Image (cartoon, helix red, strand yellow):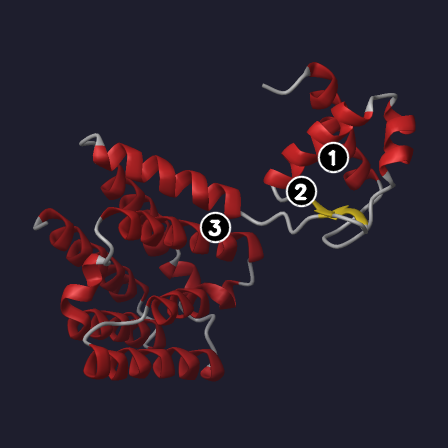
Amino acid sequence: MRSPVAQDAQRRIKELIVEHGLGPGDPLPTEAELMERFGVSRNSLREALKSLQAQRIVEIRHGFGTYVGSMSLEPLIDGLAFRTVVGHRRGEDSLLELLLLREALEAGLMSSLVGKLGADELAELDGLVRRMHEEVAADGAIAAATDRAFHLALYGPLANRLLSELLDAFWSAFHQSRAQDVGRSPEDADGVELARMHGRIVAAVRAGDAEAAEAAVHQHFDDIRGRLSRR
């Protein structure tokens, strides 16, 4: 447990970042300056900085100083994946719960997505679906990187960076959980059908049919659930 002094220093460092309008990569004051500003010891300050580094709020570059971190959702991904795996091993439906969370968010976005994709975005999605079919033909499975790229490209036109990062976090947490559980994703069992499902989503979005797009997303997740239940 962090000491009260370190907790207070952590809070004040965050306030300093906000008040000065600092962003990722911007330098923070030196340790000596922060110690004097906050009236804390070196040990308490370093305890606060290490905690903030774990949250990706700061980045400690040994020999160079301390900078504002990436503030990525990586800690959320690791926490979600670990919690899911622990729950799954204990006989809980944690993997299905994470899948349901992804489904609710992705299907719910279809009405906002229809009409937002231009010719270039649709062409990129078409290319990713073709790549999926090529990967299945060559290796029998869709590469995780291609699946991830598809989801990022699909929701990118919403121009909501936080939403894109959150969707990617849920995707990553699910696949990390699967990797720690049995080593392969359930989608790999029938890559051809999975590629077709992604194609149906693109076709519905292209046609401007939000209802069909949402139905295609639900069908995709129903398929994954079916494969999980057959394990």
Three-letter residue code for mark 3: Leu
Which three-letter amino acid code belongs to the residue tagged 1?
A: Lys
Which quadrant would residue 11 be assigned to in this image? top right
The 10 Å Cα crowd at callout 2, few under 14, some 14 to 19, many 20 or more, is: many
Residue 103 visible from this viewpoint: no
SS label for mark 3:
helix
Contact, CB < 8 Å: mark 2 with mark 1? yes
Observer-nearest of 16 and 161? 16
Of 44 and 192, the residue lying toward us: 44
Q: Nearer the viewer, mark 1 or mark 3?
A: 1
Residue at (14, 68) in percent of width and height: 190
The residue that label 2 is drawn on is 57
Say few, some or many: other residues with alpha carbon within 10 Å of mark 3 (under 14 / 14 to 19 / 20 or more).
some
Find residue 72 and name its label. none
First in sequence: mark 1 or mark 3?
Answer: 1
Number of disc labels: 3
N-terminal of the two: label 2 or label 1? 1
